[in-house]
Image (cartoon, helix red, strand yellow):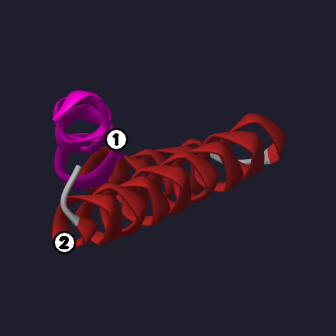
Amino acid sequence: MPIALKYLHVLVALGYVSGLVGRHIALELAARAGTMERVEALLTVSSPCEKYLVIPGSMAVLVFGIA
């Protein structure tokens, strides 16, 4: 495996894990929120973590890990 692919795999994995952590923090805070406005705001924050880091990151980690 070329060294560049290993670095790409690690870089993508860091983005994937940061998306998981960000989503988890936002969802945990939303579960503890007292008002619906705050729940909505926190769920709005968790959506980009899911859409841009977790979903594509999981596939990219797999692809760069196999390559």
Residue situated in front as seen by the camera: 27 or 59: 59
In the image, what residue occupies the spot 21% across and 42% down?
A: 64
Q: Give the quadrant of residue 30.
A: top right
Main SS of residues in magenta = helix
Residue situated in front as seen by the camera: 5 or 52: 5
Give residue 58's position: percent from left, percent from top.
31, 32
Segment colored magenta: 50-67
Q: Residue furthest front?
A: 1
In the image, what residue occupies the spot 52% across and 62% down?
A: 18
Question: What residue does disc 1 label?
Answer: 54
Q: Label 2 is placed on what type of residue?
A: Ala
Check the image and report above or below for 46 versus 50.
below
Query: Does 54 sit left or right of 51 as displayed?
Result: right
Query: Quick one: SS at disc 1?
Result: helix
Query: Does 35 sit left or right of 55 as displayed?
Result: right
Q: Give the quadrant of residue 8.
A: bottom left
Query: Quick one: SS at disc 2?
Result: helix
What's the CA distance linking mark 2 and mark 1? 22 Å
Residue situated in front as seen by the camera: 35 or 48: 48
Q: Which quadrant is home to the C terminus?
A: top left
Query: Does 9 sit left or right of 10 as displayed?
Result: left
From the viewer's perspective, is the residue at label 2 or at label 1 nearer? Answer: 2
Q: Give the quadrant of residue 38.
A: bottom right
Marker disc for residue 4? 2
Q: Is residue 62 magenta?
A: yes
Q: Label 1 is placed on what type of residue?
A: Val
